[in-house]
Amino acid sequence: MNHSRRSVLSALGLAPVLAPFIPVLHREAHAAPGPKRVVFMHTPNGLLRQELVPGTDNQFKRILAPLNRHRADITYIDGLHMNSFLTNPIPNDHPPPLGQVFTGADSVDPKDGKEPSASSSWFASDISIDQLLAKRIAASTQLAFPILNLGVDVGSYGWHMSHTGYRMPVFPDNDAAKVMSRLLTSGGNSPQTSPDLQRLWARRKSARDLVRAELGEAMSRVGKDDKTRIEKHLQVLGDIEKRESLATEGDAGAACKTFKPSAGDGDAFVKSGRLQLDNIALAFACDLTRVATLQWDYSATYRKFPWIGVDDAHHELSHEQPIGRVYEGLTKIGSWYAEQFGSLIDRLKAMPEGGGTVFDNTLLVWMSEHSSSSGDHGRENLPCVLAGGLAGTIGRGRVLRLNRSHNDLFITIAQAMGFADIKTFGKTSVCKGTIAELLA
Amino acid sequence: MIVAVIAACGCTGKVGSSEGTAGANGVAATGGQHGADRNDLPLDPDNTNPALSACRVADTGASRLLRVTRFQYDNSVADLLGDTTGPSTALASDERPGTFAVNADAALTETLYVQYVEVAEAVAARAKPQFGKLVPCDETKQGGLACAEIFTKTLGQRLYRRPLLSTEIDRFTKLYADNAMTGHASALELVLATLLQSPNFLYQFERGRPVSGSDPNVARLDGFSVATRMASFLWQSTPDDELLAAAESGALDTATGIESQARRMLAVSKTKRGWTSFFRQWLQVARMDQTILDIPLRTSLKTEFDGFIENLRSSADASVAMLLSSREAKLDNTSSAFYGGGTSLNPSQRAGLLTRAAFLAANTAVPARGKFVFNELLCNSISLPDDVDTTLKDRQPGENPRAQFERHSENPQCYSCHRFLDPLGDAFWHYDKSGRWRDAIDGWAVDARVEVKDVDPAVDGPSNGAVALSEKLAQSQTVQTCFARQWFRFAMGRDADDTRDACSLAVLQQSLDSSEGRIDALLAALTTTNAFRHVRTTP
């Protein structure tokens, strides 16, 4: 554990959550570049194409206008198609294709076509890009959290962007305060941590050891179908054990000391989102993780946005003709989400790292499973907003107009992250390879 | 619900713990001779029911190990510790492979594991001031370690749903001893938090013995496993002390003993949880949240629905017919206004389940309502084929609303299913998407007359409106049989296997036939079926 976080923690003791950060002095800044990180973000009900995609002048229209101050760092990609879906369509219901966005794979019918299946239980057939990258990073680097999968009021089972494998969705954590508390009190064996924290970790370890013994005994009590689940349960405990017994070294967390959490009030949805964005920034600043996902709401939400003057339900707007009040509503909602995306960029830019900022070493990706938000459930030209250059590997400030499977974007990102062996991703038959136009 | 079956010698031999109800190689201490199995099963003395002859050989469909649902987690800590804060909101959602929440498939993720740890710590911390009351023990007289052992055994057996083995108890007393310097209560707090993280609480492990004459992969469950299932099904919780004692004494090794406990359980208010959980999930009442955005109205209508179900549950003779035709309702000002005013429902507009707002607002479209009747009440399984173009030409100006759906008949692919769904759904035209009564739509007078064909003998023919349709469904034999199957799915966490569960389904049918469709008879009978009392393993 690096100095800055230790000191922060000892100042805070056990008190979790929203205690203000106390800057730590006397930490030398090193010029070495920081680690590469990536964030994937998803917003519901699509984005109104008419106000999203830059025209031939490449200028940002109303939805992306809040990002004009970051124009030079943002690349918009049009022409990424969800070909894994289009080559194997499923009942074009609302939630299922969500799982296909970040996996580039198929959606699996849990009933094998035998019975009408609740749309909430269609899962993706493969691992999502965030989980894959986290796994690859974990193979060579131990981090306190291999990945952060965060949500803002992501409810119903089955509508998740992140998968660890075939029909294995990941439930994001909606409790932003709890996440922050966990980030602040994550384990390690440093003598300078508070006695209270050390006691907590020791108690948790004893509990874990007991549970592992019981799980070991349980293995002989289950049939083969269920052995895998018990094994996985054991593996989870084992992974945590390994990480908590590790003391991390290095300068990677130098930006930790300059982090300041955001202030502000508002609707619970707004506050929760704000805190989750803080969590991503905090986790990156203190090098607690290098991969994060943020899912806003459930993907077919009926949420209203009174704080920006939209009193109609989002989902209903997305199924009405996009004119007048409906057009305005969809545009305002889209641009509010763009503001949130922009505010994450702001946070990362405010954190010095190496000779630049945390943002310089980061890539943010914002996508949706709908080609627009006007009810046609199109799967071509998926909205795709990128921010950041990922330590100079990804080109910035561009507008690309392609005709590719969206899988190719993830291949490109994986390669830019340094995994040269990743030449396909998700459904291999629709992959072509890296997108040369995107590389720096 | 998978258990390791003792492959070799059956009921003799004691390998492993001497404590009795041990794991894979142990022998169930609680009684039951193999000979008693046959006499115990419900047989058909006059041999008139070929399905019941299947009961001569114990069989059951395959099942998986179940992890507690969030609702069950909450109820378990409420029943044991008095913690009614509903801590499971901090846990990830349950799996929903079909209609009901059933955690039978997905492996634990790190996110969920961390959530379980935090919830367990929070529950234990909240319970700490009550330790003295929960498990009275004077540590100054008896010693901290002795009290810790009593604490572990008392709370542990309620959470593990069986007495703990000595090896298990020893681990906890060691855990206590290693942490005793933090204080007696603080060390007990860690014990409780760890019990709550134990796989023996989070998963419902089951044990049993092979049954002679049956498939070697089929095991007769021991009393504690039966208790586990009974409490999980009827109370959505862990067994209480009385049920555990019944298991210990061997009472749950016979059908009569099981039925007796089932009757006791059905008579207490905790059974409300099983009923509410079943009906809310079956109708997917949660989808009301998408239709009725006015929260006070929605709350009032959910309360009215819960009240309707609770009224049925506490009526001695609640039957399937009553479920569909009862006009009983408990209205507050808001729901009364919604339903048209007055202290009771208009009997020509409202009858049972299908005409209540909860059903209507959770199933808003005409074909969706028809589909519920066809699939969920009559146990068909129509689903949307992959390659069908489902665009329906929009309703044209001046066209009556029914005409749009009549266009299904123009396309044979659509019509193959919609010839069944639409007449059923059309009966609901008087109820808007929230469930409010309407006599006209855009000036067009509502016509809810339908002509049902080839669906069911009790339902076929003309009906005018959903009340009339409900009355017909109330008389349907198919609806009764299907209702039994839905409860089977809910109780067992899986669908019935038509071959392996034939006996069990026949027993359920018999219980309804001989009680004029009484639901409590059905639920009690469920606990005595072969499916409920056995488990099929995949070695």
Image (cartoon, coloured by chain):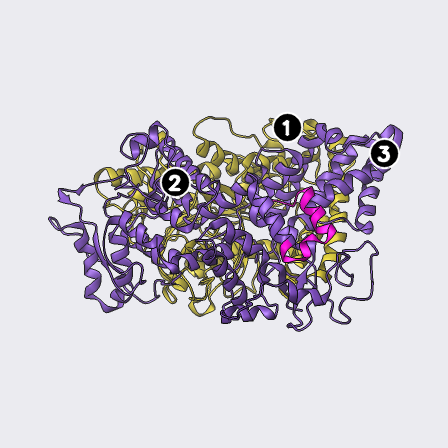
Which chain does the numbered disc 1 sit on?
A
Which one is in front, A134 or A308?
A: A308
**Colour seen for chain B:** purple
Q: Residues under labels 3 and 2: Cα distance?
A: 51 Å
Q: Which residue is mark 3?
A: B144
Image quarter (top left, top right, bottom left or bottom right) of the N terminus of chain A: top right
Q: Is residue A343 visible?
A: yes
The disc, 3 or 2, on the residue closer to the chain's N-terminal end is 3
Q: Amino acid at mark 1?
A: Pro
Residue at horizontal 32 percent and vertical 50 percent from the top: B470
Nearer to us: label 2 or label 1:
2
Give the secondary structure at mark 1.
Answer: loop
Residue B6 lies, with reference to residue A351, above or below; the image says below
Residue range highlighted in magenta: B237-256
Q: Amino acid at mark 2?
A: Asp
Q: Position of residue B447 (x, y in %)?
A: 18, 49
Residue B49 lies, with reference to residue A259, above or below; the image says below
The label shown at residue A23 is 1
Q: Residues under labels 1 and 3: Cα distance?
A: 45 Å
Whether labels 3 and 2 belong to a single chain: the reply is: yes
Q: Which residue is mark 2?
A: B289
Asked whether B500 falls inside the magenta stretch, the response is no
Query: In yellow, which chain?
Result: A
Whether labels 1 and 3 belong to a single chain: the reply is: no
Residue A124 lies, with reference to residue B467, above or below; the image says below
Classified by dominant secondary structure, the portion drawn in magenta counts as helix
Q: Amino acid at mark 3?
A: Gly
Q: Quadrant of residue A406?
A: bottom left
Q: Position of residue B34 (x, y in %)?
A: 71, 67
Q: Position of residue A89 (x, y in %)?
A: 37, 64
